[in-house]
Amino acid sequence: MNVNEAKKLVMNGLDLHEINSGVYSGEWIAAEGRKTIESICPINGQALGSVTQGEDQDYEKVVAAAEKAYKEWSALPAPRRGEIVGEIGAELLKNKELLGMLITLEVGKTVSEGAGEIQEAIDIANFAVGLSRQLYGLTIASERPEHRLMEQWHPLGVIGVITSFNFPAAVWAWNALIAAVVGNITVWKPSSSALLTAVAVSRIANRVVERNGLPPIFLLACGSGRTIGDHLVNDKRVPLISFTGSTGVGRSVAEQTSARFGRSILELGGNNCAIVTAEADIDLALKGVAFGAMATAGQRCTSTRRVLIHRSIYDDFVKKLKDVYCRVNIGSPLDPSVIVGPLVDKNAVDNFTATIRQSEKQGGHVIQGGKVMKMNGCFVSPAMIEISKQKGIVLEETFAPILFIMKYDTMEEAVQIHNAVPQGLSSAIFSTDMRETEYFISHAGSDCGIVNVNTSTAGAEIGGAFGGEKETGGGRESGSDAWKYYARRQTVTVNYGNDIPLSQGVVFPV
Ligand code: NAD
């Protein structure tokens, strides 16, 4: 399939016109008089369609609609909210192939990864349906006679969801669908590099809400980070900002949100490392490292960016990994034999080249790839770079397929190097020795939010809480009890006696 054939499939199935409104406030705000952004296909550099950008007055309309909708939506029983989210999951399933293809066209994921991302959104919808009947609070033994002490969880209100380009549908689903069953309304500001996907997903979700006669609970406000993003971050009517993106932008989002005593969930950059020990199953480790470093062309927050290999197997492992890199097919992600598609845009290609140049200046030695491909679109050959010391550019996240390779002698040294970066998202160890793997997942081991044993740093499931430590921001989203981030906890004391006994034995004889 070529880009034009794929585009037809998406256009027919999703009714995407040349100019799409990028603002939904219960109705799609007309395009007239609004600036538009073209969505550029990274496979061939051509425009796919354009989306209008929200302006100040549109933002006000969206937030006013969200505040109004909150009253009605939050009053619905949570299991009824779950039913609506379940219907959205079913609609996503019906449109899985088309939406996946749109992701392929818009951000360059392989067809399998595009469809996988929509499956992730469906999975979280299913999870949210179950959750809607499990928003449990605790009952606590009171120290006072004839008293009841308990905790309950209420929705927060209007939640701002600002997303990155690389998971243009799943990150919205993680946030919006969980927030919805808790009783909240979300206002989504998607990345300007993936606007068509945002419009398509929002249309599907809102059609479900509309046919159920409910107020708009999934609002959309496309626009730049500096306008719509900035409005959301500084808006006191928005008690929680869930931000997914780079550490630099996330830092400023966190500062601004906390300055107004708002809350934030921060899902920021990673600098993920895999350790391959002398006891590793080598074939398994090769697959895990190759997938982690090259899937989605290194544009996952969980992509493997560093690998530490035990000295005794270093030469052999590096040679085998190099062979895997040489065999990898790079090209249009619409071709099923391709496993490395394009970077998202020219800017990403420039960052890739700049990082390689800088690492060479800092003593790195490129042993494979690292070239910009002579093809239309944003294609590069994944790079393997040997380094003797972890410093400079290696401490930063470059959102591209660059793998820094180092050797180590002892597990203690490996863990020390592993943890000596500012970020703390995902980590992996490849070993068949239980002492090594248990050490790595113990408190003295990996300092990341996600730790993997004999599987890749990339490819998390929705059932666990997702997020990382240090400059990755500390947020948690998706499964487990991450729903509590979208709720306010209320401690309730009920006195059903005839007196007011005081806690801690305090006496107040009035
Ligand atoms: P980015 O930081 O450039 O943009 C993220 C979002 O922030 C976009 O919607 C952008 O428009 C918006 N934005 C920009 N300036 C803003 C401002 N001043 N105020 C408010 N919003 C603003 O990130 P990106 O290039 O789209 O995505 C890649 C980054 O995201 C990587 O660092 C990656 O690691 C990270 N990421 C992290 C996770 C995670 O869960 N930890 C998941 C996916 C991506």
Image (cartoon, rainbow, N blue to C red):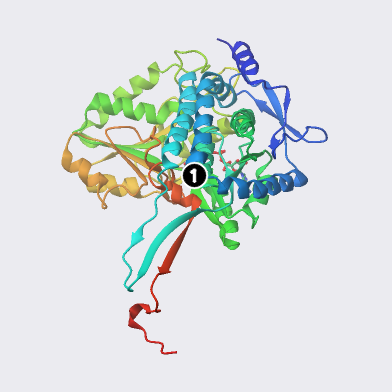
The percent position of residue 117, horizontal first and vertical second, equals 48, 28
Quarter containing the C terminus:
bottom left
Badge 1 crowding class, 10 Å Cα cut-off, few under 14, some 14 to 19, many 20 or more, is many
Q: Nearer the viewer, residue 489 or 336?
A: 489
Estimate the x, y position of residue 94 in percent, counting from the top left.
Answer: 52, 21
Residue 312's place in the image compared with 108, above or below, is below
Q: Which residue is mark 1?
A: 78
User: Residue at the spot x=64%, y=15% of the render?
Assistant: 12
Q: Nearer the viewer, residue 387 or 456?
A: 456
Q: 46 or 459, which is in the foreground?
A: 459
Residue 282 in percent (x, y) is at 24, 26
Which quadrant holds residue 29?
A: top right
Q: From the viewer's perspective, is residue 45 above or below residue 293? A: above
Visible in this render: residue 141?
yes
Question: Is 23 left or right of 365, judged from the image as shown?
Answer: right
Q: Residue furthest front?
A: 498
Q: Residue at x 60, y 28 (%)?
A: 204
Which amino acid type corresponds to the residue marked 1 in the rendered image? Ala
Ligand 1, seen in the image, is in the quarter at top right
Taking the view exactly as shown, the residue that stands out farthest to the right is 33
* Dot 1: element: helix
Q: Quadrant of the N terminus?
A: top right
* Left or right, 191 with reference to 144: right
Query: What residue do we see at 57% from left, 62% from top?
Result: 261
